[in-house]
Image (cartoon, helix red, strand yellow):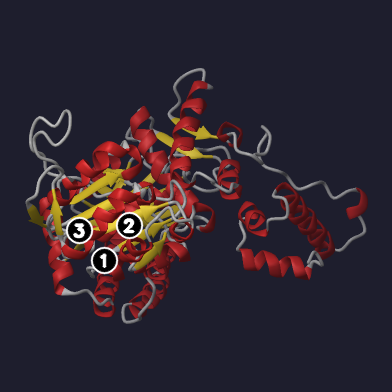
Amino acid sequence: MTANQQLATFIPLVADLARDLPEQERYQRLLQALRQLLPCEAAALLRLEDDYLVPLSVIGLSADTLGRRFKVSEHPRLQALLASPGPLRFPADSPLPDPYDGLVENLQGRLEVHDCIGCPLYLQDRLWGLLTLDALEAGRFGRIDLDTLGAFAGLAAATVMAGERIQLLTRRVEDERQRAALYREAASQQRPRELIGQSAVHRALLEEIALVGASELSVLISGETGVGKELVAEAIHAASPRARQPLISLNCAALPESLVESELFGHVRGAFSGALSERRGKFELADGGTLFLDEVGELPQAVQAKLLRVLQSGQLQRLGSDREHRVDVRVLAATNRDLAAEVRAGRFRADLYHRLSVYPLRVPPLRERGRDVLLLAGYFLEQNRARMGLRSLRLSPAAQKALLAYDWPGNVRELEHLIGRAALKALARQAERPRILSIDAEVLDLPGTPPAGGERSLPPATGEARGLSLREAVERYQRQLISEALERHQGKWSAAARELGLDRANLSRLARRLGLK
C-alpha cells in the first residue's frame, strides 16, 4: 500500500475522534480500516479486564467470539502479545495455539489460523488491551511493515480514549457510585459475574439496572426460570452505594417452612428443638448492605407479615427473643410467578407486594434477545474449552442456526447445560482427541435441528425454476424458505425470523412483498 493510500485510510479515523459515535460503530470502523490497511481474514479489538481479554469488536470471526472471555494464562499467544513492547508477528510454523482457531468465518475446511500478528494498546502508559489480525494463509503477514501496525495502534489507542472520554461526558455517574465501584474492585478478589449481550432489550435492561442501582428503592425482579435474575440482583447491588457492604442471598423455595423465619430473622438458644446456640439471621448479616430474596413468592403467609414489619420499621426480633434489633437493609426480591395474580388469589399479601415492587424490573427471556444467544454460547464454549483441555471449541454454522431458531424455554440456564452436554457428546464421537473440536447441529439435539449432513443447500436450477429470471427464481426460493420455517414453528413469525437470521420486522416486510402476508 502506498503512502497516499495509507493516509486515505487514516484520515476518516482521525475525523472520527471528534464525533459522538456509538461504541460499537466506532470500533467497527476502526477494524474495517485496519483490514483495509493490512488485508486479513479476521481482526479483533480486545480489552484487558483483570486476567481476561474481552472482545469488544471483531470482523471476520464467528459471532460467538464476542461472548468469549479469554483467560490470558490459558492462551500463550495472547500472553506474548501483552508482554511485547510493540507489534509482534508470530512465525507461520509457531507451535503456540491460536485463540481464534476454528472461529474464523468462511473457513472452507481450514480450521487453524496460519498467520498472526498483534499489537498491545496503551492508554497513557497503561496497558489497555490488544489489536490482533489473523490469516488462514501461511506467510500472509511476512512482508508487512510492523511500523505501520505500530502507527495504527497509536491511532487505535486515541480512538479508544476518545470513546471513553465521550462516554464519561455523556453518562451521568454520581461520585458515590464511582467510589463504590472503586471500593468493590479493591475489596473483591473474584471476577464478578457478567451480564453478556448486545441486543436492544438487553441494553435497556442494563440502563434500568444503572438507574435503579443508584437508588435505595426495593426492586422486584421478575422473569422466567433461568433468565439470570440473581445476576441482575448482583448487578443492582454492584451499582449501588452499598456495593462495599455484603450482598446476602436466600432462596425462599429451598427451605422447609419451619426454618424460613429462623433463616431470615435468626434465633436464640432454645427457641426450638435443635436451637443449641444463638444465631443471626440473613437480615442481620446483610445490615448496611443488600438482601436478595429469591423465589419470594414461596414465603409462607405468616412469615410474609413479619417480613413486612421489618421492611416498614427496620426492626426485627430473633425467634424466641423479645429483644429488638435495628437493621439497615435494602431488599431485592425475585420471582418467576405473577405476584399480582397471587395477590388476587389471596396467596400473597398485597401490602408486602407493594412494598417489594416499588421498582418492578422484568428480565427478558432468551428468545426475545435475538443473537445474544450466540454471545452467551461463546462464553460457555470458552468455559468448556478450558475445562476439557481443548485447543479450540467451536460451533458449526448449522449449529449456530439451530441455536438461533430454538425458543429456549429454560433460557440461559438451559443454554449453559446444553453447551456443556453437546461438548461432551462431540468429544465422545472422536476416535482420538482433536486439537479443534466442532459442535455440529445434530449433537445439540434441539427440536428443528437439521439432519446430519449440514445445512440446507440451494436446489439446482432445474424443473420449474427454468425459464424464470434471476429475481423471480430468488423470490420463489425465499417464499419456500419462509413457508418451511413458519411450518416448522407453527406459524410463529419471531421463531421463523430467528431461524432465518432476520429481524422480525424485516421478515414481515419481506413476506408482504412476496405475497405471504
State how far apart marks 3 and 1 are (Cα): 21 Å
Q: Which residue is mark 2?
A: 145
* Label drawn at residue 310: 3
* Disc with the residue nearer the chain's start (2 vs 1): 2
Q: Nearer the viewer, mark 3 or mark 1?
A: 3
* Type of the residue with mark 1: Gly
* Disc with the residue nearer the chain's start (3 vs 1): 1
Residue 229 % position (x, y): 37, 52
The quadrant the N terminus occupies is: bottom left
* Type of the residue with mark 2: Asp
> Is 509 left, or right, of 174 in this rendering?
right
Q: Is residue 176 visible?
A: yes
In terms of depth relative to the viewer, which is nearer, 2 or 471? 471
Q: Nearer the viewer, mark 2 or mark 3?
A: 3
Query: What residue do we see at 22% from left, 61% from top?
Result: 311
Tag 3's secondary structure?
Answer: helix
* Type of the residue with mark 3: Val
Query: Which of the 4 quarters of the picture holds residue 512?
Result: bottom right
Q: Which residue is mark 1?
A: 213
Up/down of 259 relative to 514, above or below = above
